[in-house]
Image (cartoon, helix red, strand yellow):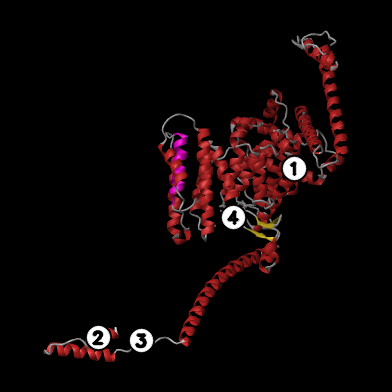
Amino acid sequence: MQALWSRAGQSHRCGCRPCNVALAAARRRAATTARRRKPTFAELFTACYSSVFATAAVVDAVRKEDRRRDLDILLEEARRDLSDLQDREPFVAPEGDGKTPDLSIQQMDALWRCLKTIYKTRPYMKEIHKPPIVTASKLFASLRSERYGCPSEATLRAACLTDYEELEKAVLADESDERYVAREAINQVQLLRESTSVKRLVDKFLHRTHKVDKEPGTTPSFEEACILAKTSKLDYTFRSIDSEWARQNTVRLNRQLRQIMNAPDIRIKEKIGRICYNLLISAHAADMHTYNTLIVAFTKAGLHGFADALVHSFFHDRLLRPTPTTFVAILSHYKVTQNHGRFLYALACITGVDSKTGGKVRRRHIDDIESNYILLDWAVDVRLRTLSGNWVWEHVPPTRALVEEAIHGLLHFKLFEQAASFFLTCVQWGVGLSIKVVRQVLDECVVAMDWKGALQLIRGLIKCKQQWKAMLLTGDGEADWYLISRIYALIDLCGLRIPGGRVSETCLANLDISVSELGELMEALEEQVSGLDRMRLPAADSQATTTAVEDGQQGPCPKTRLMQIESVWKDYVYVRKTTSSIESKLLKPDFSIDFRTAMALHIGGVAVQRAVQLRQEFERLARTTTLPCPGWEGIRQGVAVARAPKGMRGPASSAVLVRS
């Protein structure tokens, strides 16, 4: 610029006044303008030094802020754990209702320990799949109805169904629960992982829809969703940018999904197409509330394959934190689909016993725990956390809805002894249950004539001398009378009452029951019976329940003895099936070939012996029966052919053996 002003001052002038003034001003400007000086090395070094240290200071401040936030979280957890340790006292069940809104840490610990025991001592899957049942006979059905007033199997199955209206209300309540802290993506890598997981879930939905809905016709939403899934790239945003707007967006999305699933005039393919389209165009990846909404909706509609895809995505593809209703919906889904193995797996995840996925609440690797004393203090509390594999898993906090759903599921899969144990844990520690669940547990054990479950309940009632009155008896004469009649039925089923006397001490010792404890229970029952108003009983059930209570006070009759024998026979079948399961396990390659050969010979010999006994019984029946038995000669001829060598066997319809 200075050079320009200098050249301007040297330009030719005509001598007029304006030119003289302009050129003079240009010369003065060129003379007064300071020439730009080159910076020295010291100045450059100082500037670079200051910039580097300023950048380092900013980075260090950000790192310190993150570290401070992490330490605040760990400190808050340590304070909470310390408060729990200070509050650790022996729990005494209240004398009144005892149904507090939230469970204490002592109650949760008792429930977790009981579920761990149930999972570790579970029967073999073969036994759960085909459990031993009582004889399907009209005689036993009429005896149960006449003697104890038991409901039918259809009534019990209907009472065990999931109330989807209440479950949907619980899912809606989770959406507005401010105490729930979601686990969200905080960097691009995590956001990309969420996008990939949602894309994989949508692809599963679209693929399974082709197998479910094969009817011809146009489905524009489904076709558009397929094109969008193939061509578009998911571009989800971080929820932390605007948390309130993200929450409202999730609420609107879930409301729309519920409306789609509840629409009666839309075919399945169109419904799935609309659901996938909404999941793909949403501004954020589907969160735990959306998963809960879809799991409940698909299970309610009977679309279990889609609910399975959601549950699998939750356990294996996403890092979502479960809400209080998540595992209630998962247990209900596995109960409806008759998947006993996955049901028990979900119980293992709740208690931290599973070493693969856990309950998705929180986990820490043992290497991190060993190098951090704060995490070490966090991990040593075995009430809240469990070491499985190389991880310390935090347990899923149980709720009353989760406890009741677990009991319903155990009863549904005929695990009466396990359901009775879990039920008694609730009674002992004051976990309030609905009267519907209490009646369901007692009715199931009586109708199934399950001797082990009945004995477990009687032992528990004897142990919980005061708690069972506070937890089971509601003050309603009709309900209390019914429950007491069920308890008397359980006592009869266990054979703990004999006419005109007491049960021998040897028999009680074998059952791990003392004479005094049994006497206290009977006195407590008689005291409750004497205080009840029988006029409040309904006409339909008064005769059956009154007979059960009065006969229970007097002792068992021959009808009761017949049902006791049937119950013992059912337990014998259970032992036989368990023995067969153990024998089949001993044939696996884990054992030596000599041992497996000997075991196979033993199993084969026992099977042949049973076959011979069965044939003898058939022959004895054929000789003694007076009724015509068509086809019996053919059966005997088949037996004769089976005895002959292969080369001497002829047609099964001929009694003549032909030599080849």
Residue at horizontal 84 percent and vertical 29 percent from the top = 604
Considering only order in the chain, which callout, 3 or 4, is on the residue closer to the N terminus? 3
Which callout, 2 or 1, points to the residue nearer the camera?
2
Structural distance between the alpha carbons of marks 2 and 1: 111 Å
Residue 468: x and y in percent read 69, 47
Residue 469 or residue 206, whichever sits in front: 206
Q: Dot 2: few (<14), some (14–19), or many (≥20) neighbours within 10 Å?
A: few
Residue at horizontal 56 percent and vertical 43 percent from the top = 309
For label 1, the SS is helix
Which callout, 1 or 3, points to the residue nearer the camera?
3
Residue 208 or residue 490, whichever sits in front: 208
Which callout, 4 or 2, points to the residue nearer the camera?
2
Q: Amino acid at mark 1?
A: Gln
Residue underneath mark 1:
456
Structural distance between the alpha carbons of marks 4 and 2: 90 Å
Q: Dot 1: few (<14), some (14–19), or many (≥20) neighbours within 10 Å?
A: many
Residue 48: x and y in percent read 48, 81
Viewed as shown, does residue 379 lie left or right of 336? right
Q: Amino acid at mark 2?
A: Arg
Q: Amino acid at mark 4?
A: Asp
Tag count in the figure? 4
Residue at horizontal 83 percent and vertical 8 percent from the top = 656
Structural distance between the alpha carbons of marks 1 and 3: 98 Å
Residue underneath mark 2:
7
For label 3, the SS is loop
Structural distance between the alpha carbons of marks 4 and 3: 76 Å
Residue underneath mark 3:
36
Viewed as shown, does residue 515 lie left or right of 89? right
